[in-house]
């Protein structure tokens, strides 16, 4: 219900009167409350004064008694009695004041008891003489104690009373504040009511005036809204009509769309002419594609940015041109020509792309509603035009694709035939290289071993000339082996089958290895060879160490080959221009290379001097392999050379390593519970070509089974094995080999993989799945180097061809794996090692057997640490044969105990893989102890994984060897590291 002005005034005044009366009443009650609060404050103050009087009177009483004891003056007796009477009166007053407060009444009663005790005490003590000092002091001390009790009670009482005083003063203050707030609040309410009443009167008067004005404005707005609604209805109707025309029909080409749109717009806008252009982006032209009643002279195109039409298309906004000059854009009719007066140009843009232009010609100026309609239509019209143009383009593409498909189908058969031919050619090439590798390496292996044996001339029957011929045969065979390896490497690189094993490699280690490898060669050829490191000694490069060294070996070998005596060859490592690159520069002052040959030498089988009478030999594969390996490692090789001055090959390698995929390790085949049933007894035909010991075998003999299809090499292995006290059985094919293994149960097997009939892989698989044969150690001797999947199944692998020293190492390994260890009551029999062996031949040169046999270790005390007692047995026998005193230990913890118990140990041979404490941890503990840190240590490991050597050196090893241990290398290392013993 809305109140009138008079009613609101009456209501406001009534509220004001009620507030004034209410404030007056509340102020009265507040005043009365303040009076009561003030009375309580005065009451509390009176209580405190009374308690203070008690304290003063007690002090006077005590002083009167003390003075009486000291002076014996009778007037102090009177003063004492007077004070006692006043005390009792004051105590009575105090009790009366606190009778309404139970707590204080209880405290006052306690004060009264303490007071009576003090008074009674002093009244009893009347015969103390001042001469009796001790009694006087005792009396005063006792009185003082009673007085302290009274003081505590009076303090407790006054503390509580002071709290009451503070609380009552706060209440009094709050009451005063409430009264003031109530008074001012009432006044404020009165002022608010008066203000509201004044505002209501003023607002009512102004509202009436404003309402009149708003009513007039509303009438004007209604008229404008009606006009605007009428225009919007016309625009929406036109927009709907054009959109239905654009979306509701299918247009085969843009000309039909243009004709329909221009006719509809001319009808809707009541104009005489309309033209639609499409934009040709490649020629930057606006080309008319359809029109309604076009002008008499319509140009075939307009250039973008030229003229009114070309500039309007670039503007992106609607362009209006009024008051056209006479003769411009004239329209022809049946009765004559018509002169238009206005022109509107609408550019059609879609997603910042010009699609076309719409040109409209009018007899009068276009009004705002027409311009607004055109602005709404331009995007839809542009999209429709773009859609039809895209469909035309798509149809053209489909036609072209159909033609191309026919052409592709016609050539598909040719490509299929070519791909089949290429695949077959690649297969033939792979098969040829595999067969060539086996067929060349197998006889070459026999040549190298026999030549080496002849050169050693152990029985002394060869002349020096014959030994020289044997050495030449061995060297020629080694050169042929190098050529075979280069061809295979090049084939693998071209086929993309090179596996990289990147690891962190210290640059200083690379340089040291190269210097050790080529220092002797340079000295023999009287060439000054230098190695310079211009980077930090701690710098490590993430790369494949083997492949990097292969590149550097090729470059240094070429430099030494083409540099004459007294020449200079240098290897320098320095930072690259980019911080992530490293430069290895190999420089010489040799023959140099002409510019026309500098690009050709990196191609396979190309040399700078390709004549038949050239001075230097070689196949020309080294640089080709090196360049492709460098690219595999993420780097490159460049050459700068001048004929007659020298050459510099620069190897660029990334410090962070190549971007290579991680090698996928194939899972080993699942173990079967039962061996496959192969009836080798029916298939095997025992060979009669190579005499062996199968008919001489007696109980307790060590039997070695040799499965090798090359008769010459099998004969060499048989003779060598007989020299190692083996009874040998030779099988020339897989079926016979498996038959002999089952029949004779040999102590060890030498197995070739590439065999006629049953392959070496199948033999190995059958042996390992047959329980009674699975324990036999098998050493593989083959020309293939892709045996990673067999690493856990074999005792070792050696790649043909190899040196005689490696053959010694093979039999040492078989001795370790086949000789039973002495039975110990505390140590269980060790299981055969299952660690994978490296399939890569050792790159270090072997020590000559005659030199190794002359090494003596007399007086040397060696600690041998290995958990495999067969290794300990074999190595101890070998070391003691050279005069060493060997102390064994089965793990790292036992090794530390032996070092502590035997301070005279000169050297430690340490296996890496051990229980309790492994080799790495043991080496670190040895280096931490100052009493042992000087002892040289040689680490040995069967893993031979990339980075193991550096890991062992970092842990504290002095040197490193891989299993199977090369006896000659071990003896040489011991000779180098052991201190010289006095004769």
Image (spheres, rainbow, N blue to C red):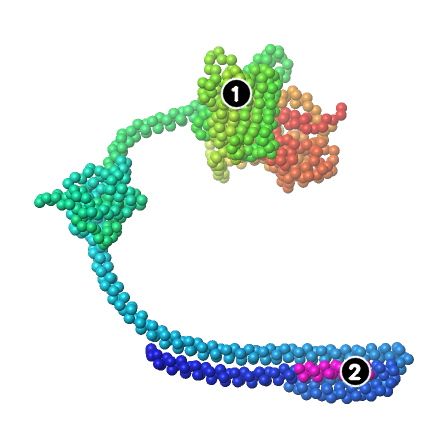
Screen quadrant of the N terminus = bottom left
Residue under label 2: 60
The x, y position of residue 654, in whole percent, is 51, 32
Residue depicted at x 63% and y 25% = 968
Residue under label 1: 647
State the residue in front, 25 or 703.
Answer: 25
Looking at the picture, does residue 876 appear above or below residue 324?
above
The x, y position of residue 818, in whole percent, is 60, 31
The x, y position of residue 476, in whole percent, is 53, 16
Looking at the picture, does residue 18 appear above or below residue 587?
below
Residue depicted at x 80% and y 78% = 144
Looking at the picture, does residue 217 appear above or below residue 9?
above
Query: Magenta segment range?
Result: 45-64
Left or right placement of residue 79 versus residue 681 in this view = right
The x, y position of residue 633, in whole percent, is 49, 31
Left or right placement of residue 379 versus residue 928 in this view = left
Q: SS at mark 2?
A: helix
Residue 258 in view, yes or no: no
Q: Residue furthest right?
A: 131
Check if mark 2's residue and mark 1's residue have beta carbons within 8 Å: no
State the residue in front, 730 or 579.
Answer: 579
């Amino acid at each position: 219900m809305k109140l009138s002005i008079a009613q609101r005034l009456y209501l406001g005044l009534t509220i004001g009167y009620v507030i004034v009366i209410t404030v007056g009443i509340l102020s009265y009650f507040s005043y009365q409350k303040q009076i009561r609060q003030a009375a309580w404050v005065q009451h509390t103050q009176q209580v405190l004064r009374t308690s203070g009087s008690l304290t003063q009177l007690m002090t006077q009483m005590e002083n009167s008694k003390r003075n009486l004891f000291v002076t014996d003056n009778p007037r102090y007796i009177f003063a004492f009695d007077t004070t006692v009477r006043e005390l009792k009166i004051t105590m009575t007053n105090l009790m009366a004041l606190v009778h309404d407060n139970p707590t204080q009444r209880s405290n006052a009663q306690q004060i009264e008891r303490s007071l009576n005790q003090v008074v009674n005490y002093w009244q009893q003590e009347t015969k103390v003489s001042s001469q009796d000092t001790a009694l006087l002091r005792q009396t005063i001390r006792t009185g003082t104690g009673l007085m302290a009790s009274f003081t505590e009670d009076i303090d407790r009482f006054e503390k509580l009373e002071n709290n009451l005083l503070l609380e009552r003063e706060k209440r009094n203050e709050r009451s005063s504040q409430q009264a003031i707030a109530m008074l001012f609040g009432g006044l404020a309410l009165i002022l608010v009511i008066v203000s509201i009443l004044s505002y209501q009167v003023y607002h009512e008067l102004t509202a009436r005036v404003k309402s009149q004005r708003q009513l007039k404005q509303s009438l004007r707005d209604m008229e404008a809204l009606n006009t605007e609604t009428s225009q919007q209805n016309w625009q929406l109707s036109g927009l709907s009509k054009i959109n239905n025309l654009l979306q509701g029909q299918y247009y085969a080409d843009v000309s039909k769309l243009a004709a329909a749109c221009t006719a509809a717009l001319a009808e809707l806008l009541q104009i005489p002419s309309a033209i639609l252009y499409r934009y040709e982006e490649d020629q930057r032209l606006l080309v008319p594609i359809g029109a309604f009643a076009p002008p008499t002279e319509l140009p075939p195109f307009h250039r973008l940015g030229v003229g009114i039409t070309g500039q309007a298309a670039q503007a992106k906004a609607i362009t209006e041109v009024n008051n056209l000059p006479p003769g411009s854009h004239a329209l022809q009719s049946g009765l004559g020509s018509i002169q238009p007066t206005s022109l509107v140009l609408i550019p059609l843009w879609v997603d910042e792309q010009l699609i076309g232009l719409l040109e409209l010609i009018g007899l009068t100026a276009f009004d705002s509603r027409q311009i607004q309609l055109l602005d709404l239509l331009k995007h839809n019209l542009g999209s429709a035009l773009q859609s039809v143009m895209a469909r035309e383009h798509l149809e053209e593409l489909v036609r072209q694709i159909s033609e191309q498909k026919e052409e592709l189908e016609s050539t598909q058969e040719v490509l299929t035939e070519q791909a089949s031919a290429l695949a077959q050619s690649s297969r033939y090439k792979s098969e040829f290289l595999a067969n060539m590798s086996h067929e060349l390496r197998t006889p070459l292996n026999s040549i190298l071993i026999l030549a080496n044996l002849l050169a050693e001339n152990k029985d002394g029957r060869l002349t020096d000339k014959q030994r020289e011929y044997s050495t030449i045969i061995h060297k020629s065979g080694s050169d042929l082996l190098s050529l075979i390896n280069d061809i295979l490497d090049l084939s693998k690189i071209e086929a993309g089958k090179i596996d990289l094993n990147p690891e962190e490699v210290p640059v200083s280690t690379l340089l040291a290895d190269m210097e050790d490898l080529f220092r002797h060669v340079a000295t023999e050829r009287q060439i000054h060879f230098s190695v310079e490191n211009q980077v930090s000694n701690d710098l490590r490069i993430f790369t494949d160490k083997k492949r990097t060294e292969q590149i550097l070996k090729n470059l240094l070998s070429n430099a030494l080959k083409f540099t004459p005596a007294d020449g200079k060859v240098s290897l320098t490592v320095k930072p690259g221009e980019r911080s992530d690159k490293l430069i290895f520069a190999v420089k010489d002052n040799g023959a140099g290379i002409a510019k026309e040959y500098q690009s050709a030498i990196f191609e396979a089988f190309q040399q700078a001097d390709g004549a038949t009478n050239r001075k230097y030999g070689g196949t020309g594969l080294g640089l080709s392999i090196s360049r492709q390996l460098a690219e595999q490692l993420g780097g490159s090789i460049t050459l700068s050379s001048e004929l007659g001055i020298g050459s510099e090959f620069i190897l660029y390698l990334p410090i962070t390593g190549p971007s290579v995929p991680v090698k996928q390790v194939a899972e080993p085949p699942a173990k079967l519970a039962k061996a496959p049933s192969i009836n080798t007894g029916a298939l095997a035909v025992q060979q009669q070509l190579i005499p062996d010991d199968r008919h001489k075998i007696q109980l307790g003999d060590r039997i070695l089974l040799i499965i090798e299809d090359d008769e010459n090499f099998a004969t060499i292995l048989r003779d060598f094995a007989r020299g190692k006290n083996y009874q040998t059985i030779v099988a020339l094919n897989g079926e016979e080999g498996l038959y002999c293994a089952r029949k004779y149960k040999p102590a060890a097997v030498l197995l070739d993989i590439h065999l006629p009939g049953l392959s070496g892989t199948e033999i190995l698989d059958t042996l390992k799945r047959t329980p009674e044969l699975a324990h036999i150690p098998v050493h593989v001797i083959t020309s293939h180097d892709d045996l990673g999947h067999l690493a856990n199944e074999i005792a070792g692998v050696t790649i043909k061809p190899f040196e005689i020293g490696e053959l010694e190492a093979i039999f040492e390994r078989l001795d370790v794996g086949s000789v039973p260890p002495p039975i110990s009551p505390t140590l269980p029999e060790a299981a055969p090692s299952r660690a994978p062996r490296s399939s890569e031949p050792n790159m270090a040169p072997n020590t000559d057997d005659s030199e190794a046999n002359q090494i003596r270790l007399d007086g040397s005390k060696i600690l041998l640490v290995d958990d495999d007692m067969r290794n300990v047995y074999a190595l101890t026998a070998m070391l003691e044969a050279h005069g060493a005193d060997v102390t064994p230990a089965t793990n790292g913890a036992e090794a530390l105990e032996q070092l502590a118990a035997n301070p005279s140990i000169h050297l430690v041979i340490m296996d890496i893989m051990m229980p309790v404490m492994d080799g790495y941890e043991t080496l670190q503990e040895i280096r931490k102890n100052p009493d042992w840190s000087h002892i040289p240590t040689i680490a040995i490991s069967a893993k031979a994984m990339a980075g193991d050597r550096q890991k062992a050196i970092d842990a504290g090893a002095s040197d490193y060897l891989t299993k199977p241990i090369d006896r000659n290398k071990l003896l040489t290392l011991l000779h180098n590291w052991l201190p010289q013993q006095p004769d």
